[in-house]
Image: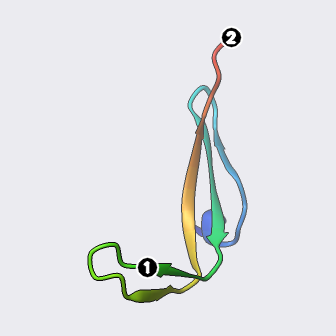
Amino acid sequence: MEALNGGERVILNKFGTFLTRERPEKESVNPKTKIPVFLEAEKMLNFGQLQIL
């Protein structure tokens, strides 16, 4: 967990890779009420699976 919080990539052999990415802030619209909503920037955990040949 410390590696992911530090922004490092974590590789698990024969499984895949975990890394964190930052989603930028943006303005969106609530589809039900049509009211503009501001979404703050946040960190996301991404996973890429190993491609077996």
Give the number of the mark in front: 1 or 2.
Answer: 1
Circle 2 SS class = loop
The residue identified by callout 2 is 53
Query: The N terminus lies in which quarter of the figure?
Result: bottom right
Q: Residue at x 68, y 10 (%)?
A: 53
**Residue 29 circle label:** 1
> Would you place residue 17 above or below residue 20 in this image?
above
Q: Is 18 placed left or right of 38 in the picture?
A: right
> Would you place residue 17 above or below residue 36 in this image?
above
Q: How crowded is mark 1: few (under 14 residues within 10 Å), some or many (20 or more)?
A: few
Where residue 11 sits, quadrant-wise, is: top right
Q: Residue furthest left?
A: 32
Q: Residue furthest right?
A: 8
Tell me how far mark 1 sits from mark 2, CA to CA: 43 Å
Foreground: 36 or 48?
Answer: 36
Circle 1 SS class = strand
Q: Residue at x 55, y 66 (%)?
A: 44
Residue type indicated by callout 1: Val
Pinpoint residue 50: horizontal percent, then vertical percent: 62, 28
Pinpoint residue 39: horizontal percent, then vertical percent: 50, 83
